[in-house]
Image (cartoon, rainbow, N blue to C red):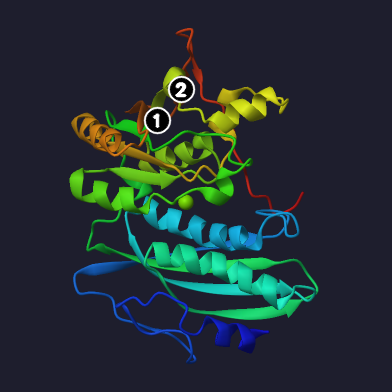
Amino acid sequence: MEQDLLTWLNGRTFHHACVTLGIGDDAAILAPRPGFETIVTTDMLMDRVDFLWGTHDPALIGRKCLAVNLSDLAAMAAKPFAAFVSLALPRSMSFEDAQRLMQGILELAKEFQVELAGGDTNTHDGPLVVNVVAMGETPHGRAWLRSGAKPGDRLVVTGPLGGSLKAKQFSFSPRVREALQWRELAEVHAAIDISDGFCLDLSRLLSASGCGALVREVDIPISDDAFAMSSAGSGKTPLEHALGDGEDFELILALPPSVARILIDHAQHNGLQVRDVGVVTQSNEILLTKASGEVEPLPAIGYLHRLST
Ligand SMILES: [Mg+2]
């Protein structure tokens, strides 16, 4: 299968100038631009954890496997340029399905001008596992980290949250273009992408920054799918979906108030729903101002990856 896939891939990937030598040799050669740093991320997605093989379209599965990695690069304000894809394919998988999986990856890679620069393919008796390594670049010292939030910073979220299980987990567009624009427009102190849930990922950003926050419940952007899942009997309120569902792949940014205003206006102008949801505080608590005016600890809900169940 590997040789057939390589033959099929030949000529189908976007070519990026930072990749001197791509697929076809023992290793790739990358030539980062002078004055830039290389940002590297990896994410491994597995059947029955991150997607359902046999239920979801293989092309959408492939797309998601790359998109989650591009979202991590967006959270660092990095411009993606190369990806490496390793597949553990079930023996029962047809060549056509493997092609379709790769097609989903290639299409998104082309959209974001990413070269598929290498990888590996194995077949085994287990389920489908896809590991992607993605690389991007930022001008030296300009990457956004989780650790830079300061008391007084506004917290903004780049889109509606919750209910991504319905569709958005496969259709979301990683916030790469927005992050690159905002990197030039505004002084962002800290950033993270929402993979495991707003509350959990916000707590990660704040704990890396040594800060707390006061979040306003009425300002949490709730997606239509969060409302739909709730009214279909999920057992959660729309707000609970928005706070804890995960796989929204929106960004949480911490930035000075004047800058937050500029960014929100810019986003609105471009048809994007960026919302100011609260403020970074000096305490180490994350608090939620309820619609009623009461203040209580923000529930620490989200998706935790466990070693055993
Ligand atoms: Mg992340």
Q: Nearer the viewer, residue 252 or 238?
A: 238
In which quarter of the view is residue 91 placed? Answer: bottom right
Q: Nearer the viewer, residue 35 or 147?
A: 35
What residue type is disc 2 on? Leu
In the image, the residue with mark 2 has its CB under 8 Å from the nearest atom of ligand 1: no
Q: Which residue is mark 1?
A: 212
Q: Secondary structure at mark 1?
A: strand
Q: Nearer the viewer, residue 110 or 209?
A: 110
Q: Secondary structure at mark 2?
A: strand
- Residue lying farthest bottom? 25
Give the residue drawn at x 32%, y 52%. Answer: 177
Q: CA distance from mark 2 to mark 1?
A: 8 Å
Does 181 sit left or right of 122 as displayed? left
Q: Tell me if residue 183 comes above or below residue 30 in the rendering.
A: above
Instruction: Categorize mark 1 by other alpha carbons within 10 Å: few (<14), some (14-19), many (20+).
Output: many
Do labels 2 and 1 touch, CB within 8 Å? yes
In which quarter of the view is residue 8 placed? Answer: bottom right
Q: Earlier in the sequence, mark 2 or mark 1?
A: 1
Q: Position of residue 22 (x, y in %)?
A: 42, 84
Q: Position of residue 141 (x, y in %)?
A: 23, 59
Give the residue drawn at x 56%, y 41%. Answer: 246
Q: Position of residue 301 (x, y in %)?
A: 59, 33
Q: Which residue is mark 2?
A: 287
